[in-house]
Structures are given as C-alpha cells and as structure tokens.
Amino acid sequence: MADGTFVNDAALVAAKDLRLELRSRVAVSQVVPFAVLLLVIFGFALDGDQTTLQRLTSGLYWVAVLFAAVLIVQRAFAVESDDGVRDALRLAGMRPASVFVGKAGAIFVQLIVLEVLLGVGVAVFFGTTLTGWGLLIASAVVAAAGISAAGTLYGVLTAGLRVKESLLPMLLLPVLAPVLIGATRAMGAALGDVAVDGWSWFNFLAIFALIYVALGLFAFGPLLEES
Amino acid sequence: MVSETVISLRGVVALLGRFPALARLDLDVDAGEIVLVRGPNGAGKSTLLRVCAGLVPVDSGNARVLGHDLRADRRVIRRSVGYLGHDTGLYADLTVRDNVRFWARATGASGADADAAMVRLDLDTRLADIIVARLSAGQRRRVGLAVLLAQRPKVWLLDEPHAALDENGRDVLDEVLRQAAAGGAAVLVASHDHGRAEQLAHRSVSLAGGHVHSVREPGGTGVFGG
C-alpha cells in the first residue's frame, strides 16, 4: 500500500511532527522557557558579571541548546510511544530511512527556532554583541543537523525502554560532546572571543552531521524494529 | 466466495520472551472469509493477530500471509495488513481528521480515501476537528476503524473490535467488515463478544495454550483440531 516517494514520506512525517508540536505547544510552553531559564541561571551562577558572561557566551549558549535539544528529542519519541503508535508506524510500510529524515527534519526545524531565540536571549541577558554572522549561522545550522540526526538515532534506540526518560540524556549528551566543543569554538571565533579558525570547526561539525545522517539512514530501521 | 488462502500457518511457534505464546499453531484463512478467534485470556489470540501482522516474529513453523513468508518478508506483508489492537495507534494531540489523513497517506491511500472513511464512520461531524485526547474510548475506536477503512487492507486483523463501541458503532463495524470480506479481504477477529462476533463470522476457532483447540463451522458443533 505504501508507495510514496522517499521525499514525500519524509515530508509527511516531518509535517506531522511539527503539527503535533504546534497543537500541543510543548516546545513553546516548556522547552523554550526551560532554555531561557538556563541562560538566566547561568547569569545568577556567574554573579551577573557581564564581562564574564560575554566571554563565556558561546559555551553557555551551546550548553543551553544541548539540554533543550534533549527535551525536544524526548518529546519527538514520546508521541510515538502512546497508544500503539509505534506499531502503526511499523505497519504503515514507509521506508525507515524516510521516517528518520522526517523526524530528524522536524527536530532540526525546532532546534533552529530555539537557536534563534537563545541568540536573542544571550544578546538581551548577557549583553553579547553577535558578530561574524556567516560563520555563526553556518555553524548553528550544521550543529543543529548533527544534533537532530544523533538525537533521532538515540531517540529511537531508547524509545521502547521503560527507563527512556533518564537513559536518553545519559546516552545522548556524551555523544553530542563533539558538537558542544565544535559549536562553542566556531561561535567563539565568530564572536571574536577565541583566536581559532572557526571554519575548520564548521567543517568538524559538518563531518559529525554527515556521519550521523549516514548512520541514521541505515540504522533507524533495525532500531525501530527492535524498539 | 473466492477460495484463495490468504493466511496459512503450519506448526507456528512464537515466543514472547521465553514463553511460547503460540505453540505449533495451524490455521488457514481464505480470501473473503471472516474468522472469529476465541479463547480465554492468555490463549494466544492477540499474539496470533500480531504474528499475522508481522509485529511478532515467528520462531519456527511455516507462516505465509498473501503468499509471503512471514519469517522473511514481514515488512512486505505489513503494507497489505490492517491491524487494530487494544491500542488505536492514534496521535493524542492531533485531531481526528489529521490522524485519519496522516495514516491514510502513510499507507499509500489518498486524502479522498481518508475523507470517505470518515464519512462512513460518521466522523465528518464536529468530531473531525477535535483532538483525539478528548475523545471517549468508543470514539477512538471508531477513528481507528476509519484509519483501517481508508487503507483498504487485504487482511484485517482486529483485536476485540467491538469493545467500547456503542450499539450503532458495532452495527457500523459489522457492516464494514462484511463489505471488506465481500470485497475479497480476509478478516480475523479476536473477540469476547461471542454473540455478535459469531453472527458476523463464517467460522470460529478456539485457542487454548497457544494452539487451535477446536474449529466450529457455521451451524456446526466443535471439532477438535490443531
């Protein structure tokens, strides 16, 4: 029965996931406030010292993005766990790789929105002046792609487990450590805080994203089957 | 009635962990046939349906659905199977219309098929734009059935389909299943509502301990099998 193209199936899944978020407003009412709250807490922890906060902006920004990303990934797979939906997804006969791309795509879109909002957040709360827009945007996009791909892979890996809520962050955060390092360096270079070649870190992030996209395309099916 | 065998199980064993939920089970279901699966709790009714849907692997035995080997081609079989279990497989935060359209398109059916199924199940009313989380169990069951109807599967696998439905819903369900069978689909129904389900079925099989204990033909008495 399922004879849609790869792209159509992926678009169908992504549109469904984004519609779910628009209707449930979990991202708007919980994830974004949580991420902004993190920025505020960082401010309290560092005594509201603007100089320190501006110097550490890139690291604090990406820590906030990663923690919020874990919530987004958890939510993306929680909706597939209710009321036999995962069985229905298996029975639908869509290519697993297209489901992977669709789910990762929806997470990617949410992450981009989150990154923009947190960018405004660091400008407002830390007084950071955003510069180096080309590198800033490019590294944010490839970092979001890497987080989405790895998150989708580990999301489906833990989806069927009873302890998924605590296991997902434990597995995913170490895996995303290279993104934290690379994105922090690239953003630091864009903001002029660190004297490194930001574009080489962009390349690093792009390679990470490519590896996890490739892994996801091949491994998502078997993992969905076993979840 | 067409006599093509759609489901053919021979000596099928399916394990849930180490427990043999199906133990050397034999069963044939022909195209156009509605078969009622009976049995006490734990007899293997739900596992039988899930095995036929390709959701539970076959550990040994010969199992074919629509000519495909269930051990080798589970994914191919799934595309032609409609399964409604105890869960309805619906997204709680999407509306009825969103759910039916999404699952219809995901299984290769069109938006028109989805809309027609909603009309058939009386869901094209104010219910269409209500999120599933706000529906009663019976209404969710109706939506799950609409999803199946939109898919037009060749094999219908239904676990306690009458549960939670009101009288009108049960009448609609029976009519939908009769039409599906008349159109050549094979229908396997596990139900405790024997009175209604027996009227619907062409044949009933009783499971006990994971295998077929007896087979009852229309108007006949129990015959030991399996």
Image (cartoon, coloured by chain):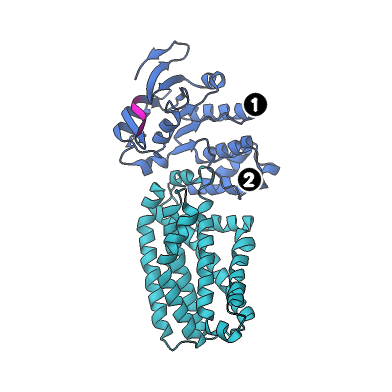
Name the disc covering residue B87, or none: none
Q: Which three-letter amino acid code belongs to the residue tagged 1?
A: Glu
For residue B105, above or below residue B196: below
- Quarter holding the N terminus of chain A is top left
Residue at 40% x, 26% y: name it. B30
Query: How far, Cα to Cα, is label 1 from label 2?
Result: 22 Å
For disc 2, the chain is B
Vertical comparison of A134 with A215: above or below: below
Q: Which residue is mark 2?
A: B133
Q: Nearer the viewer, residue B56 or B200?
A: B56
What's the magenta region?
Answer: B19-26
- Quarter residue A218 falls in: bottom left
Nearest to N terminus: mark 1 or mark 2: 2
Q: Which color is chain A depicted in? A: cyan
- Is label 2 in a helix, a strand or a loop? helix
User: Residue at left 63%, top 55%?
Assistant: A23
In the image, which disc is placed on residue B167? Answer: 1
Using the image as rendered, state which of residue B65 and residue B221 is in the foreground: B221
Crowding around mark 2 (Cα neighbors within 10 Å: few <14, some 14 to 19, many 20+) is some
Residue A89 can be seen in this image? yes
